[in-house]
């Protein structure tokens, strides 16, 4: 009898250890509200349209995924011993207004990674995930971070606009006295990897058809100070129009950025600057975005050889009435246009500085539920003269 009781006690003890060493968590965020959006510009910007007539596109109604993208996910870890853990994250995005999956209909479009983690040497992840710039930069260059639509830092730092890469392998160090370093490489940022096809007499003979990307950065956080420096690059895939014809594509797009913030307690200050060359990364979407398809710098991960854009940001946040008020100004200055725009026979095009002014307020109703209000105005959207975007909204967030 005593042996039976002892065995039962030991089994119960081992079961408790196993449960402590392995964990799986279900979590999610719901974000929805009411808002108004407007885009104004010239009809000459529209695809297959001529003339200089004004146009205006407006929408009033439900908004969602503003402060936080709507999501549900599973994350877990298993203790492998000696401080080593197996980890995974499977995160699915969705549209609260329709219930449809986001990120192009991917089941786990926000993140799908597995890897190994250690408090001593850091973490190695493989799968679909955001790049280093999207992880390290937004929170130090803007009080809006990676949130609030066109108010977010990625509206001018396109490499930090929640850029997700498929086929990624990424390593990040532990935190050393406030410092952390990360580096990652994607074998193809969107979709399955294409093979390199060797067959003489075909359009794809010997071409590199994958969009390969490299991302790296370092950040620091200690007390009131936070800072980040990031660098990202991708190479556009190679193509040819006719068999035996010249190869196009193979353009290297680069972006670097530096940002810092300092919390004075009564107010927190954010500053950022950087440069993008030869194209854009994850461009910000605007109401009626498809109307700008004929503009060669619109669209995400579109190479534009010769393009140079300098980006700047200034922001403030401060406690107010139990919540937080935020304000920012950001500018993307296209100092050089794409080489293709200067080619013989191409129409003359003008690029203007894009400025974005934003104001917002957040208030916590509980540990898991909060509300927000914000407004943002951008002029010269996608560097098009007199193209203006306005958005205001009021929303509720619940985390589980």
Image (cartoon, grey):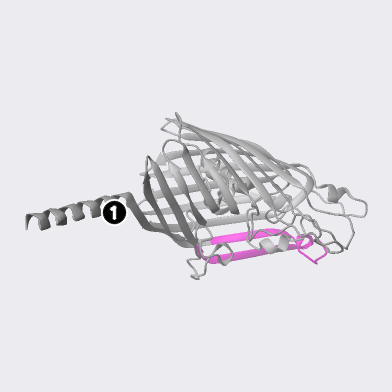
What is the x, y in percent for residue 157? 63, 44
- Determine the residue positioned at 48% across, 70% down: 99
Above-or-below relation of 21 to 82: below
Q: Residues within 10 Å of mark 1 (few under 14, many from 20)?
A: few
Above-or-below relation of 177 to 293: above
Tell me, yes or no, if residue 11 can be seen here.
Answer: yes
Where, by quadrant of the figure, is residue 255 drawn? top right
| Quadrant (top left, top right, bottom left, bottom right) of the N terminus | bottom left
Exactly how many numbered labels are in the figure?
1
- Name the one closer to the observer, 277 or 33: 277
What is the x, y in percent for residue 148? 52, 52
Q: Is residue 86 left or right of residue 38?
A: left
- Regarding mark 1 in the picture, which secondary structure is present there? helix
Tell me, yes or no, if residue 165 can be seen here.
Answer: no
What is the x, y in percent for residue 54? 74, 62
Q: Is residue 10 left or right of residue 206?
A: left
The prevailing secondary structure element of the residues shown in magenta is strand
- Determine the residue positioned at 43% across, 35% down: 120
Q: Which residue is mark 1?
A: 19
Which region is colored magenta?
36-63
What is the x, y in percent for residue 358? 55, 47
- Name the one closer to the observer, 299 or 388: 299
Q: Is residue 38 magenta?
A: yes
- Name the one closer to the observer, 120 or 214: 120
| Quadrant (top left, top right, bottom left, bottom right) of the C terminus | bottom left
Q: Is residue 188 magenta?
A: no
Above-or-below relation of 336 to 246: above
- Name the one closer to the observer, 180 or 260: 180
- Determine the residue positioned at 71% across, 59% down: 195
């Amino acid at each position: 009898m005593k042996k039976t009781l002892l065995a039962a006690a030991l089994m119960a003890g081992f079961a408790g250890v196993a449960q402590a060493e392995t964990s799986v968590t279900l979590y999610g965020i719901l974000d929805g509200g009411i808002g108004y959006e407007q885009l104004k510009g010239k009809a000459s910007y529209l695809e297959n349209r001529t003339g200089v007539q004004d146009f205006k596109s407006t929408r009033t109604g439900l908004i969602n995924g503003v402060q936080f993208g709507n999501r549900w996910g599973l994350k877990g870890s298993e203790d492998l011993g000696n401080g080593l853990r197996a980890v995974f994250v499977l995160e699915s995005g969705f549209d609260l207004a329709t219930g449809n999956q986001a990120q192009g209909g991917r089941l786990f479009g926000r993140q799908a990674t597995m890897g190994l983690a250690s408090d001593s040497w850091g973490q190695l992840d493989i799968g679909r995930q955001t790049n280093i710039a999207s992880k390290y930069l937004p929170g130090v260059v803007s009080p809006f971070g990676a949130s609030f639509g066109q108010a977010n830092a990625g509206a001018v730092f396109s490499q930090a606009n929640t850029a997700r890469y498929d086929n990624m392998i990424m390593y990040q160090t532990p935190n050393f006295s406030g410092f952390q370093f990360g580096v990652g490489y994607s074998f193809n940022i969107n979709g399955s990897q294409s093979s390199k096809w060797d067959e003489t007499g075909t359009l794809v003979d010997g071409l590199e058809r994958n969009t390969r990307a490299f991302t790296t950065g370092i950040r620091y956080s200690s007390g009131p100070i936070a800072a980040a420096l990031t660098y990202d690059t991708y190479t556009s895939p190679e193509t040819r129009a006719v068999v035996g014809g010249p190869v196009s594509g193979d353009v290297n797009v680069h972006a670097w950025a530096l940002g810092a913030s300092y919390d004075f307690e009564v107010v927190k200050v954010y500053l950022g600057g950087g440069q993008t060359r030869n194209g854009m990364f994850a461009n910000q979407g605007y109401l009626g975005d498809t109307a700008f398809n004929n503009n060669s710098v619109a669209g995400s991960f579109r190479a534009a050889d010769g393009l140079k854009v300098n980006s700047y940001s200034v922001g403030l946040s401060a406690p107010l009435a139990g919540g937080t008020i935020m304000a920012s100004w950001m500018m993307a200055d296209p100092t050089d246009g794409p080489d293709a725009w200067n080619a013989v026979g191409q129409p003359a095009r003008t690029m203007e500085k894009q400025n974005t002014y934003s104001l917002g307020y957040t208030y916590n109703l509980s540990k898991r539920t909060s509300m927000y209000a914000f407004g943002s105005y951008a002029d010269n959207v996608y560097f098009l003269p007199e193209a203006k975007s306005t958005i205001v909204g009021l929303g509720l967030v619940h985390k589980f």
